Image (cartoon, coloured by chain):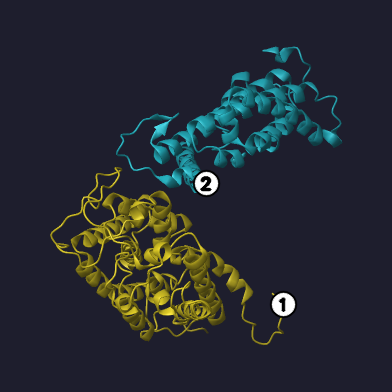
Chain colours: A cyan, B yellow
Amino acid sequence: MSAGITKHTEPKADPSSTDEFIKGLWRENPVFVQVVGMCPTLAVSNSAQNALAMGLATAFVLVMSNILVSALRNFIPKEVRIASFILVIATFVTIVDYAIQAISVDLHKNLGAFIALIVVNCIILSRAEAFASKNGIGKSILDAMGMGLGFVFALFCLGAVREILGNGTLFGIAVLPESFEKWIIMILPAGGFFTLAAWLLLFNFFKLKKAKA
Amino acid sequence: MLSKTLHISSSPHINKGISTDTIMRNVVYALLPMVVFAVYAFGTNALFVILASLVACVGTEHLLCVWSGKPSTISDGSAVITGLLLGLTLPPIFPIWMTIIGGILSIALGKFVFGGLGSNPFNPALVGRAFLQAAFPVAITTWYPAFSEGRFTNFSGSVFAFPFSTPIVDGITGATPLSAFKFDKVTADSMDLALGLVSGSIGETSALLIALGGIYLITRKMMNWRIPVSILGTVFVLSGILFLIDPKLYPSPFFMLFSGGLMLGAMFMATDMVGSPITPLGVVIYGVFIGLLVVVIRIWGGLPEGVMYAILLGNALSPQIDNLIRPRIYGTKKTKP
């Protein structure tokens, strides 16, 4: 990618570009491994559609803010970097907010305040601070795309389980027979915690198994 | 020279030899009359629910122990009690598949994730029941009348509902005294309530038998009498005051005492040794808090019954109570907490 054009000063033994992309999907998955960005994860994962919309919105903001932060990294004074990052992020969140409102008012209503709260999403700020402000644009895009897709994947995992168990549907289409008894708790806030715990259990189980082997 | 037989240990140095499983066995004895009465009052369906809960709890405990590479702890009897208590708090025609989910979650989520017996902050049976209440609000409030005809020969379609399918309730259902009061303002006769001639969860109806079981444990010093006394006392006094203010609007204190799961909760669930405070004063504060919540939820809350949530909140509060009521160390000055 364009990593060669920008003058960056990483050591030679740097992870490859594909690795920057892959790590966010699985090994450093923002939700299941880093356990950051819990607020939208728990709040809007009550259906697959909400989860996917929220994930994509966050991923978009993440990619765009990583590009801008990375491009401006040599101009932002260290003392005001967090404020500057937030300003950059807030700009893109405003864009996403209006975009979702234009696409579907119902979806906007479902996601509610959590669209505006993307501004303070730990994932975005942590990628800006920990990665984009230290790396070139190319790598930052890959990192943001990996992390963003990892977040979409995690939210979808939660949303799908919660919607199937809590409502018997997936994306609003019935996937279970009519006689299925809905687990109301799964679409309530408590269900978010249970489902997240179950996924974390699964991820840690695989991690431990891999570490042992 | 020190003798080789010198035995060094921390206090207590004198013990009576009562171990966990002795206490647990006695709790099971105290619960048995209620189980027998429940099966007599609600028929074979209730027996199946209790058995399903028992098997699910003990089985989960055993499997989790084996999977985590520890010796199985089912012989200490705590899983049996959790299973019995969960079964006793469910409606008589509760589907078996839901009961099994409740049992698995009681042990796994209520006890095992915290590190097993002695580390669980909440009463495991109530954790399972709280999950079931939130997950299946309709099934858990479908009651079956007590002493109905053919209760020993009639297998309810609801109990044997196919796993994960909606239970189909065949035949009659009956309202509990508490829901009848909450939604229709009809009070039941206190004597019927005390004897258990009414509808309700499997094991909660006979206040008399529950009280007898509790007194048995109290006389054997296996239960802290302050907990049930402070809970029941608070409920009685508070609802008594409300009853004196307006007898038409508020139920009589006897109705409050003998209806719903209050007796069972106060005697067998709030007294969970792990989830309740340690000091005598702390225990009384805990009991008053639970009693207060029961009255508040029942009278002003949206639900007809609030004993379960009251006890769970009490459990959550008990470490804080223990912190607050820390006894003064002998020889030191009184300090602020």
Say which residue label 2 marks. Answer: A189
- Chain assignment, label 2: A
The answer to whether any part of residue B66 appears in the image is: no
Quadrant position of residue B117: bottom left
Q: Residue placed at 29% from the left, 49% from the top?
A: B97
- Give the spatial CA distance, label 2 vs label 1: 39 Å
Residue A33 percent coordinates (x, y): 56, 38
Amino acid type shown at disc 1: Lys
Classify B215 as above or below A36: below
Classify B176 as above or below A117: below
Say which residue label 1 marks. Answer: B336
**Foreground: B19 or B229?**
B229
Q: Residue placed at 62% from the left, 39% from the top?
A: A37
Residue A183 percent coordinates (x, y): 39, 45
Residue A24 percent coordinates (x, y): 58, 29
| Badge 2 density bin: few <14, some 14–19, many ≥20, Cα 10 Å | some
- Chain assignment, label 1: B
The answer to whether any part of residue B155 appears in the image is: yes
Under circle 2, the secondary element is helix
Q: Closer to the observer: label 2 or label 1? A: 2
Residue A47 percent coordinates (x, y): 49, 35
Classify B37 as above or below B83: below
